[in-house]
Amino acid sequence: MKAQERDQLLRSLQIRFENNLHRHQGHAWEQVQARLEGSPAAVKSLHAMESSGGEPDVIGHDNGSGQYIFCDCSAESPPGRRSLCYDREALDSRKENRPQGSAVDAAAAMGVELLDEAQYRKLQQLGEFDTKTSSWVATPAEVRALGGALFCDRRYGKVFVYHNGAQSYYAARGFRGLLRV
């Protein structure tokens, strides 16, 4: 990443941070920026989150490790990460009408993890997300072993968890990433 791109990303993150203080009360941008400056890999991951429409922002802090927790905070599932099946096994099982890829592979390539159900519900306490779209979430092994995968959305003022075949994909379903810095 060029210095100019990096600086522009950091400015965008700072503006978003300052405009959404309710997501990270008690934390200062200078502390977050110091962590980012010490982690070029994290900046690269945040760039991937931003460039695919995720609008990453700090949603938490781990007091034990000192890490800041970033998550995609776009109102809807990031548009640059939709129409993906759940994982590589699901992608490989499709014989026809294969999607471009899988959510698990895309998250790994970006250096982020998929939110799990608890993290997704926690995010929803900070705002209303996925009111028109849905997002794949990390699926327990026992569900995945049976061919399924989980996704979440928000409708009627409530957060819902659903299941689908892991090989399915939809134009309105993507995934939200989580990054610890």
Image: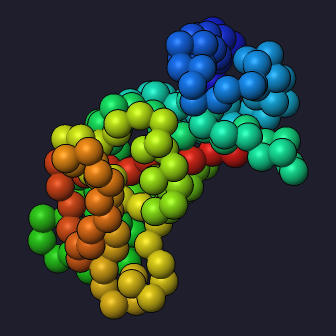
Depicted 167 relative to depicted 69: above or below: below
Q: Could you say where residue 53 lies in the image, as x and y percent from the top left? A: 38, 30
Q: Is residue 96 left or right of residue 87?
A: left
Specify the farthest residue to the front: 157
Residue 5 in sight here: no
The one nearer the camera, 116 or 128, is 128
Q: Could you say where residue 2 lies in the image, as x and y percent from the top left? A: 64, 17
Q: Quadrant of the N terminus?
A: top right
Specify the farthest residue to the left: 96
The one nearer the camera, 94 or 35, is 35
Image point (19%, 47%), residue name: 156
Chosen colour scheme: rainbow
Depicted 103 relative to depicted 171: above or below: below
Q: Within the image, what quadrant is residue 131 found in?
A: top left
Residue 79 in sight here: yes
Q: Could you say where residue 103 lies in the image, as x and y percent from the top left? A: 39, 58
Image point (60%, 20%), residue name: 21
Q: Is residue 45 left or right of residue 85?
A: right
Q: Could you say where residue 163 lies in the image, as x and y percent from the top left? A: 27, 72
Q: Is residue 151 left or right of residue 41?
A: left
Q: Quadrant of the C terminus?
A: top right
Image point (46%, 28%), residue name: 55
Q: Within the image, what quadrant is residue 152 found in?
A: bottom left
Q: Is residue 156 left or right of residue 60?
A: left
Image point (74%, 25%), residue name: 26
The one nearer the camera, 101 or 131, is 131
How many discs mark residues in the rendered view?
0
